[in-house]
Amino acid sequence: MPVRILPDHLINMIAAGEVIERPASVIKELVENAIDAGANQIAVTLENAGKSRIIVRDNGHGMLPKDLELSVERHATSKLVDDDLSVIKTLGFRGEALPSIGAIARLQLISRPPESDSAWEISVAGGKKGTLQPARANPGTTVDVRDLFFAIPARLKFLKADTTEIAHITEIVCRLALVNPHIGFTLHHHEKLILRYARIQERLLPTSPYQQRVEQVLGVEFIQNSRSILTERDGMSLQGFISLPTYHRTNSQEQYIFVNNRPVRDRQLQSAVRVAYQDVIAHNRYPAVVLYLAVPSDQIDVNVHPAKTEVRFRQADRVRSLVISAIKSRLVEQDIRTAPIITQQATPYFKSSFSSKNNGFPGFILGEKPSSFHWQQNQQQDAKPANQPFIMAEQPSHDHVTHSTNLVSPHFLGNAVAQIHRTYIIAQTEEKMVIVDQHAAHERLVYEKMKNALTDQAIKRQLLLIPEIVNLPAGQAEMILEKADDLQKLGLTIESFGLNTILVREVPAMLMGLKVPQTIIDLAAQIYEQGDSWLLQNHLHEVCGTLACHSSIRAGHTMTVAEMNALLRQMEETPNSSQCNHGRPTYIELRREDMEKLFGRR
């Protein structure tokens, strides 16, 4: 067939197909336009989940008639400074989104600048532009989109149920609201209010406006179970909120990442978050984070995706290192403890359920003994039945002993007072009771010690009797060879063996049972996609975790009070000790006020 130039309406439809996938795509473009227009109030109204009608109103600076007419033309924009694509500080191009939407739907724009006495409107239907008309409207811009995809009805068949489409729309609005706390947002569907986020006025707040908006969007529970981070390096800054390791989700939906105030779903950044949490959370669970990353505009390309949901960094390794180190350093700080939600979830299980057949339960005294007495483990316990639930210290029979005079413990986890079912340590401070899983806690302590040993000394390597030859996809062999020096520090010795082929001579001694070819293939793919080689280190840590699990104090092991207190003190000094290697909490705490509520005292 001969080569020919496509007609304009078909070009517009193809361009629209790259940007407009579903109603949420339209709302993303229109709300971003409103944000760029300086609005501080944005209202979104839907009919039929956006398929029949989408209205986006803002109170921004509006457009003059000549700008309004140009805004629906292809390749027209007010947002590109000096025609330099490397310096983009806005969210999108008004002249690109509007004609794309007008090519596949019925589009009407009404706009009025605040300094103007009158408004103007223009319509586009199926790519055909109407004439400019005077109108009545408040200052700002209103975009009315009807009959989405009427020009390409086949696209309608691929849309999901209304509830699914509304969920996508809600997520878009939430993400844009999180990064714009100074703007108020509302979303209605068939006149029913779906969400409302009040505008945050920074000068009136004692805390960060980001914190207030995060609380609006994700709820107070997230704020209570997260910690703020703020760090700067190499001209970049990272701030936001990261969940405690024991507060996690089944997927990555609650990972909100923004780059230069732009919501993104970047695999490299999501991978960096996962690496930062890999030692403290189960492999099939995901932390919740809200991260705001600021990078110099000449160090980032936002045009690698039509919808600008992905970005490319000039120095990706530095960005990745910043994210990982910032999160890790915050997680190991001593104020990081188990998430408060763990206590909230545990409290109902403490509620009493006495019956006529239950005359109570074996009691134990929650009190530290005066220092003049040496607290000994009960020497008669071995003669008791194996299922004896409580193991207590001997109680001195001195009338002058007063338990209330020595309750204060200077330690965060308090002092041990009992062991239950030879598995759980009961400790107390002045204001709370602490229950520790002795196996999970000791497992973390041993694991951290093993990891430190890997860092402090060279990893032992095992020479393969017959070197492994591994064939890799084109391009991946060169990239993994560039990391050869780093991999050798981890005990893996590789060298080139011809085109797209790697020869493996040595592997870490700890990983002798590893399937070498598959590991190299996975490692090369990771380096090719993400530019990092944490997979091998992760394998080493997994072995350390397994060894730590098998060499730790087991459930069912009887501990003396001295041993229990020693374990508690080590937990307070060890990073990440609030959860085991598998992401489970090592302890829960019950505050005095919680106990008073359980017994009706409060």
Image: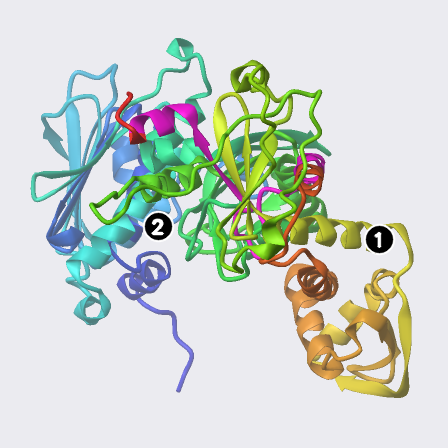
Please name the residue shown 68% across and 42% down the image. 567
Q: Is residue 306 visible?
A: yes
- From the viewer's perspective, is 181 left or right of 381? left
For marks 2 and 1, the one nearer the N-term is: 2
Residue topped by disc 2: 74
- Where is the C terminus found, in terms of image quarters? top left
Q: Position of residue 69 (x, y in %)?
A: 25, 38
Nearer the camera: disc 2 or disc 1: 1
Above or below — where is 582 with respect to 296? below
- From the viewer's perspective, is 5 left or right of 411? left
Decide: few, some or many residues near mark 2? Use Cα within 10 Å; few <14, some 14-19, many ≥20. some
Is 580 contained in the magenta span? yes
Region rendered in magenta: 568-597
Towards the viewer: 452 or 473:
452
Above or below — where is 506 with respect to 568? below
Towards the viewer: 456 or 271:
456
Q: Position of residue 169 (x, y in %)?
A: 26, 48
C-beta proximity under 8 Å, tags 2 and 1:
no
Q: Quadrant of residue 138?
A: top left
Towards the viewer: 477 or 545:
545
Q: CA distance from mark 2 to mark 1?
A: 61 Å
Residue topped by disc 1: 453
Q: Is residue 38 visible?
A: no
- Where is the N terminus found, in terms of image quarters? bottom left
Above or below — where is 330 with respect to 317? above
Task: Check disc 2 and give the amino acid type.
Answer: Arg
